[in-house]
Amino acid sequence: MPTDVVVCNGCCCGNTEKGHPEVPIDFLKNAWNEYGLEEHVKLRISKCLGPCSMHNVSLLRTEEKQEWLGKLSQKEHYEALIEWACNIVENKYNTEIPEKLLPHRFQRFQEVVIRD
Ligand code: FES
């Protein structure tokens, strides 16, 4: 499995009509370009990942583990996703979650099907 950041922008996550914060897709894509991340860490914008109640949801995946993150609402949360990817580019063994994201982790045991 590739190392990737999966950012949900589905029926609930990022849906401002439902009162949820917008997902800053262009901001993320620009950062991925600016820092040359794509070769090492894929950025995937996905449709619904399942746990809509945790909007806005993202998933950090490496070969060893996956970390679900929910309730992402501020730009600094998305900056921390970028930070995570940059850390992996610098040192592929550094997959620690940035401190800012630690309170946003949640467990999910169902297999995820990414639809982008
Ligand atoms: S829309 Fe994001 S988990 Fe369902």
Image: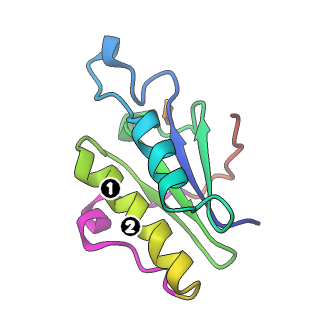
Indicate left or right for 72 with 91 as reference: left
Task: Name the residue rendered at 37%, 36% in the picture.
Answer: 55
Marks 1,2: beta carbons within 8 A: yes
The amino acid on which the numbered mark 1 sits, given as a three-letter code, is Glu
Location of residue 34 in the rendering, given as x and y in whole percent from the top left corner: 48, 55
Which one is in front, 45 or 70?
A: 45
- Going 26% across and 73% down the picture, which residue do you hit? 99
Q: Is residue 107 magenta?
A: yes
Q: Residues within 10 Å of mark 1 (few under 14, many from 20)?
A: some
What kind of element bears circle 1?
Answer: helix
Magenta highlight range: 94-108
Identify the mark at residue 83; answer none if there is no mark. 2
Looking at the rendering, in which quadrant would you find the N terminus? bottom right
* Residue to which mark 1 is pinned: 79
- Relative to residue 97, is residue 27 depicted above or below? above
Element at badge 2?
helix
Compute the Cα span from label 1 to label 2. Answer: 6 Å
Q: Which label number is shown at residue 5?
A: none
| Residue 19 is one of the magenta-drawn residues | no
User: What's the residue type where badge 2 is placed?
Assistant: Glu
Going by the picture, which residue comes out furthest to the right?
Answer: 1
Residue closer to the observer: 103 or 40 = 40
- Look at 65% across and 67% down and name the residue there: 3
| Res 66 → quadrant | bottom right
Of the pair 102 and 6, the residue shown nearer to us: 6
Image quadrant for the C terminus? top right
Residue 37 vertical position relative to residue 22 in the rendered view, above or below = below
Task: Report x, y in % for residue 24.
Answer: 38, 35
Residue at x 63% of width, y 71% of height:
62
